[in-house]
Image (cartoon, rainbow, N blue to C red):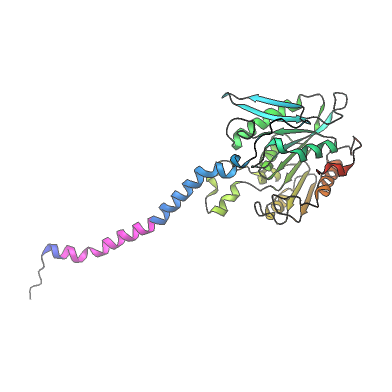
Amino acid sequence: MNDLAHPSEKETTASPAPRRRRWMRRVALYPLLLYGVYCGVLFFAQDSLMFPRDMAPAPLKFPTEKVTLEWERLRDDGSRGVAWFIPAPNASPENPRPVVIFFHGNAEIIDHQIRQIEGCRQLGCSLLLPEYPGYGRAEGAPSQASIMEDAEYFYDELRKRQDVDSERIYLHGRSIGGGPAAQLAARHRPAALILESTFTSLASFADGYWAPRFLVRHPFHTDDVVSTLTSPILIMHGRHDSIIPFRHAEALRDLATQSTHVGFVDYDCDHNDFPGRDNEEDYWRSIETFLSENANLDRNPAGADRKSASPS
């Protein structure tokens, strides 16, 4: 009949529920903690993922003989930016030629853009190859801001040349190079923009890593540019691209509602083999036709055979 229990006994019998709740809260917090650590690792690793410059080939001991001018930029921090300029064979102050500004992929350097050098020569275009900071001969570290600072500088230098037709500047970006090409197009309306195997935005790739997009430090929103740009836009992509899926090209095409003309060329290939072994001639013909019909490129002024634009 003794209903009175010692106080310590009552605390003992009542304590399991609060302890269980505390344990459940801790268990619930563990996934959030792990996710936070995961996002932190991605945040600090993103530069090496976006700009794997260690995978890029070494600079050539001697630049290709067709490179006649190496431009340098001394940045405010004392580091050196680099670009190569290759004038068209018949360019002169009396005969200013159109120019292509080409931005390469993220595991490449300007030294190995022989294909673009030969192709632009056959088009009768001069070629500007800005190097990304930290790549090849260029010093510094790559980022959206640093890449665009160099791009702006070399763009301004290009427009000062009397052998360049500043009304016929074509911007061409491959893979990650589509990002700076589009950003430069947003600031300076080009005669044409060519996007090759590129993305809607780098920020969109955060979705594939289950990470919030705001963590991406170099978003390169090509989609925002394309949706407002009035310049002619040529989009080229491999249907089996395993790095930047084909849907990115389709999305960019659908967004380009303000452009005066949108060209769309797709090939039966992946990303790194674009445009495919048997499509090189068609690739250059598509570019030449698009620029001739929409961006005032005078066809083959040097009288060269289009087939010779394909590297052997």
Looking at the image, can residue 51 be seen?
no
Q: Position of residue 186 (x, y in %)?
A: 69, 38
How many marks on residues?
Answer: 0
Residue at image coords 76%, 38%: 114
- Work out whether 209 lies above or below 233: below
Examine the structure image and report whether residue 136 is included in the region drawn in magenta.
no
Direction from residue 34 to residue 5 in the image, left or right: left
Residue at image location 73% in from the left, 48% down from the top: 256
The chief SS type of the magenta part is helix
Residue pushed farthest front?
Answer: 61
Q: Is residue 77 above or below residue 192?
A: above
Q: Position of residue 140 (x, y in %)?
A: 58, 31
Give x and y (percent) for residue 290: 83, 44
Q: Quadrant of the N terminus?
A: bottom left
Give the quarter of the image for residue 182.
top right
**Depth order, front residue of 134/215:** 134
Which quadrant does the C terminus fall into?
Answer: top right
129 and 57: which is toward the camera: 57
Regarding residue 310, the answer to whether it shows in the image is yes
Q: Residue 115, position in %: x, y?
A: 77, 41
**Relative to residue 27, is residue 67 drawn left or right?**
right
Q: Residue furthest bottom?
A: 1
Indicate left or right for 48 with 98 as reference.
left
Residue shown at the point (79%, 48%) measured from the top left: 263
In this orientation, which residue lies closer to the viewer: 260 or 74? 74
Q: Residue furthest left?
A: 1
19 magenta-colored: yes
Query: Range of the magenta residues?
Result: 10-29
Q: Residue at x 52, y 50 (%)?
A: 212
